[in-house]
Amino acid sequence: MTVAVNHVVDGPGNGRDGGDSEVVVLSGSLGSDLRMWQPQVAPLTGAGYRVVRYDHRGHGGSPATQGPYDLSDLGGDLLSLLDALGVEAAHVAGLSLGGMVGMWVGAHAPERVRSLTLCCTSAELGPRGMWSERAELVRVRGMAPIADAALERWFTRGWRAGNPRRAEEFGEMIRATDPVGYAGCCAAIENMDLLGALPRITAPTLVISAAEDPSTPPEHGRRIAEAVAGARLEIVREAAHLGNVQQPERFADLMVEHLEVQKHE
């Protein structure tokens, strides 16, 4: 069964009826909530898009169902959200887990996807045992033991030192995540293998990798871009895993540019 996920709509037609505005759905990372996409909201709405941000099940304001989850569960949640909003097809942008969900939807429900922007993500992310160990840790001890290590992966040392208050906001975001939901999503990543599905993606695809991302280094993005017909790869410097937060303007520019290209093709 799908979950009615917490979401926020910004921009033109911010009710159910969005008029003629094209919809961009922003799907976040494991351990974050929809606030992680705040830097991209103004550039996207300013370009005339209706922006939908949402929380994965067990994250932010979305309820946690008993896990483990599969990508089909998380992808189903996104499709149900589009149905609830009356959106036939949307531009889907996802980072990390959100990008995995985007790839799944792009391969399994291509008619619902106008374009894909896949940020700091992977189509296969091992080692598998790491994910089950992390899931067990948070189930037993809660989220606090993993927060500091997550921040080290999300942001470079220099950015954390220069933005301590912002880094702590993301630390609180991690600690506030429901352990059941987090563990369930760990299982979805552990069992994920999207490599065979990538050639089925037909939506125009932009892959953005961050040069200093220790979780999904640029070779993961390159592997995706090589498997999806016509996909383009961009590598953003001076950014770690949450590159859209560390280099907000560059990510926003790339995203808007990719969306605008679709209007003229």
Image: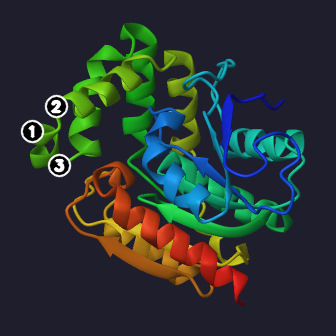
Q: Which class describes the residues within 10 Å of circle 2: few (<14), some (14-19), or many (20+)?
A: few
> Where, quadrant-wise, is the C terminus in this rendering?
bottom right
Q: According to the image, label 2 marks what residue?
A: 164
User: Residue 236: x and y, percent?
Assistant: 30, 69
2 and 3 marks in contact (CB < 8 Å)? no
Front tag of 2 and 3: 2
Residue tagged 3: 156
Q: Which residue bears the numbered disc 1? A: 161
Residue in the picture at 54% in, 70% down: 256
Q: Which amino acid lies under the numbered mark 1 shown in the image of this protein?
A: Ala
Q: How is the image coloured?
A: rainbow
Q: Secondary structure at mark 3?
A: loop
Do tag 2 and tag 1 residues touch (Cβ < 8 Å)?
yes
Distance from label 2 to label 3 (Cα)? 12 Å
* Mark 2 residue type: Pro
| CA–CA distance in space, label 1 to label 3 | 9 Å
Residue 98 appears at what percent x and percent y?
A: 56, 49
